[in-house]
Image: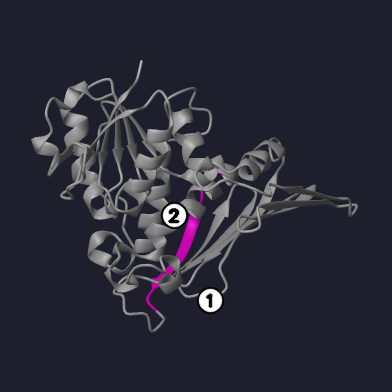
Amino acid sequence: MPLKILIIGFGSIGRRHFEVLSSLKQMNFINLVTKQRLENQICYESLESVDDLQSYDYFVISSPTNLHYEQLKYINENVSNKIIFCEKPLFESKKEHFVPKNQIYVGYVLRYHPLMQKLKNMLGGEKIICINAKCGQYLPAWRPDSDYTKCYSANKNMGGGVLLDLSHEIDYSLWLGGEIKSIKGYQDKVSDLSINSDDLTMLIGKIKHGYINICLDYISKITHRRLFVESMERSFELDFVANRLMVCDKFGVKSEFVVPNLQRNYMFEQMHLDILGERVWACDFEFGLKTMKVIEAIQGVIYE
């Protein structure tokens, strides 16, 4: 039986979710919340104007980050026993206590990279002593067909900024290494980009058996996304751009795993199928809050 889906927000990421969900046979009834007018497509201008919200099975929040909280709160309070997907991160800053009444999941899609899943399985039982995650791309080259100064990434008030945009690295570091303590972070705008959001974030923290270092930026002209993990027994390097995982043990024995033709929407397809299915890899609401706590520590939020 086809699922009835409501996608909230129809920017680049909303269009991508629409494309992915439209391609899946069991999910071919999709309505949108957007001020855009699209041919042969039901569009509502606001959540409040949606007819019979309870009739939808799956909600996909793909709006700018600063809108997530109010939209998630509205849906959560007006439906029951539903599945709600919210793009990462959950919120742009600390919010009042939120009690989920539905099943809520967060869009940390890198969990669905086949080499990330392989790394997760390989690390099972190993003592992780160091995690080093680096991600950088020059913002004007990120979306070359549009004016970077007008995208939400450039606008702090819309929830833009590299810390929120690239919080995947925080999510998977927590997922692999566990709780991060004694966090020291720096968040700043250091380049000449015409933006008012942060373009550089650096984090150092302590995990159970060692330390973690994360560096995120909008300023690197050499696009990169790499994860280095050191355990007592082995070293791992996952290059998300090259789709390559390198492993080396203490005796110098090396292994290489490559995914040469990873399709553009593969991870998004797997994420939605998992959330609507067995939920083996999905980031649930509680884990999404753990990532938010790290974000807020860098932002300087004080917890009582």
Mark 1 packing: few (<14 Cα in 10 Å), some, or many (20+)? few
Q: Is residue 249 left or right of residue 2?
A: right
56 or 185: nearer the eye? 56
Which numbered dot is residue 167? 2
Q: Main secondary structure of the magenta part?
A: strand
Where residue 248 sits in the image (x, y, percent)?
81, 52
Q: Secondary structure at mark 2?
A: loop
Q: CA distance from mark 2 to mark 1?
A: 20 Å
Q: Secondary structure at mark 1?
A: loop
- Boundaries of the magenta span: 178-189
Q: Which residue of the protein is positioned furthest toward the front in this rendering?
A: 39
Residue 154 covered by magenta stretch: no
From what the image shows, is residue 160 above or below residue 210? below
Residue at screen point 35% across, 62% down: 299
- Residue 209 makes an appearance in the image: yes
Residue at screen point 65% across, 44% down: 115
Q: Are marks 2 and 1 in contact (CB under 8 Å)?
A: no
Mark 2 packing: few (<14 Cα in 10 Å), some, or many (20+)? some
Q: Amino acid at mark 1?
A: Lys
Residue at screen point 62% across, 44% down: 116
Where residue 266 sits in the image (x, y, percent)?
53, 41
Where residue 282 sits in the image (x, y, percent)?
47, 34
160 or 209: nearer the eye? 160
Q: Amino acid at mark 2?
A: Ser
Quadrant of the image containing the N terminus: top left
Which numbered dot is residue 221? 1
Q: Is residue 224 left or right of residue 181?
A: right
Mark 2, mark 1: which one is toward the viewer?
1
Q: Which residue of the protein is positioned furthest toward the left in this rendering?
A: 49
